[in-house]
């Protein structure tokens, strides 16, 4: 009985590490894909920055 409990614990640790690795990869992929595309707020911010720069001149 004690031996099977150790086996179950080892299996759970192995699955936990896989889950953490998978979750980390998903977070990384989603984070990087979010940086690739410029949204409307980004564009508006750039226009505001340009307008401020033009006013300073």
Image: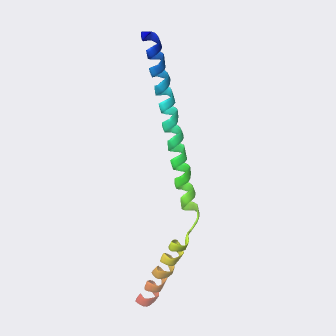
Q: Position of residue 53 (x, y in %)?
A: 44, 84
- Residue at x-position 44% and y-position 15%: 5
Q: Residue 33 placed where, x, y %?
A: 57, 56
The residue lying at 48 percent from left, 37 percent from top is 20
Compared with 8, 49 (above or below) is below
Nearer to us in this view, 4 or 16: 4
Residue 3 visible:
yes
Q: Which residue ends up furthest to the front in the rendered image? A: 1
Quadrant of the snapshot with the C terminus: bottom left
Vertical arrangement, residue 35 with respect to residue 29, above or below: below
The reply to whether residue 57 is visible in this rendering is no
Colour mapping: rainbow
Q: Quadrant of the N terminus?
A: top left
The residue closer to the viewer here, 35 or 1, is: 1
Looking at the image, how many numbered discs can be counted on the residues? 0
Q: Position of residue 12 (x, y in %)?
A: 47, 26
Q: Is residue 46 above or below residue 19?
A: below
Query: Residue 8 at what x, y percent from top left?
Result: 48, 19
Answer above or below: position of 55 versus 31.
below
Task: Name the residue: 50% across, 23% down.
Answer: 11
Q: Is residue 56 left or right of residue 23?
A: left
Q: Residue at x 51, y 81 (%)?
A: 47
């Amino acid at each position: 009985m004690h031996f099977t409990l150790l086996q179950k614990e080892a299996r759970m640790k192995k699955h936990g590490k896989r889950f953490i690795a998978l979750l980390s990869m998903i977070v990384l992929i989603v984070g990087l894909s979010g940086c690739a595309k410029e949204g409307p707020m980004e564009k508006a911010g750039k226009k505001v920055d340009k307008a401020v720069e033009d006013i300073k001149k």
